[in-house]
Image: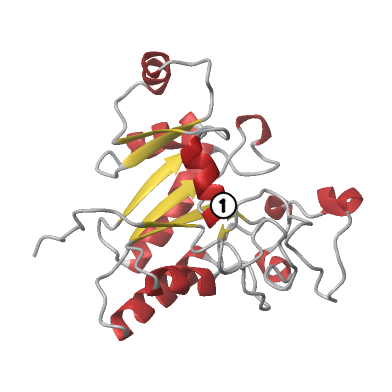
Amino acid sequence: MAEEFPAFYIEGHRGTRGLMPENTIPSMKKAVDVGANVLEVDVQISKDGQVMVAHDPKLNPEITLLPNGEEITKEDADKYILHQMDYADIRKFDVGSKVNPAFPQQQKLKAYIPLLGELIDSVEQYAAAKGLPPVIYNIEIKADPAKDGVYQPAPAELVKRVMDVVHEKKIGSRFYLQSFDIRQIQEAHRQYPQVVTGFLTSDKNASLEENLRRIGFLPDIYSPTTSWSPTALWQKATGGA
């Protein structure tokens, strides 16, 4: 039986960032509750090769507390590069209790950085229990081309690890991969040509034609972003930035 997809995509960015701690399981469940049929998640890779849901390459001092409840100083932030830490240690940090001044309506609760597979399991079970259609996962691969081996593994390994999780969870084609790093979608297209890919760009100096030449193929999704557009400002105000 062919999978059915929604006529209109309602996306929860990092779950419900304006209402719950971003990229956590509670944030994704809340997004399902308020009607999202697409969940945007950011992924990073731990030192021991686990695929985690986190936006930043380091534990972010603005939203993270140490396992003992104390704050991370900005001076110490470089000590907590996720790709240089085992997941068992990362999971001990609290990414939900600290007040985020950018999102005053965000509910505070103790939360941890989840594994992508764990998050998918939880969301699938939650939607089924509520009698709701299964969601689509917009998986953003976070990577810095200048930081292979420091912030992330090389693209071939990174993409394979993400795809291994997706295949293990048997969600069919209810996902797509996107990245600001062209190499990630190029690698996804090379290894898995049937997978939907999206290119993100905030480069105002590169035209659509220039970017498509760099990519080398036509991605399914092309997403230019800017911090100053009315849409972006509205998204930030509502937790969608």
Left or right: 67, with 240 as reference point: right
Image coords of residue 143 (percent x, y)? 58, 40
Q: Residue furthest bottom?
A: 129
Image coords of residue 216 (percent x, y)? 35, 21
Q: Which residue is mark 1?
A: 237
- Give the residue drawn at x 66%, y 64%: 104
Picture quadrant of residue 11: bottom left
What amino acid type should be assigned to the residue bearing mark 1? Ala
Under circle 1, the secondary element is: helix
The count of marks equals 1
- Give the residue drawn at x 48%, y 31%: 183
Can you see residue 72? yes
User: 227 or 57: nearer the eye?
Assistant: 227
Left or right: 176, with 236 as reference point: left
- Give the residue drawn at x 71%, y 62%: 100
Q: Is residue 109 above or below residue 162?
A: below
Left or right: 112, with 119 as reference point: right
Can you see residue 241? no
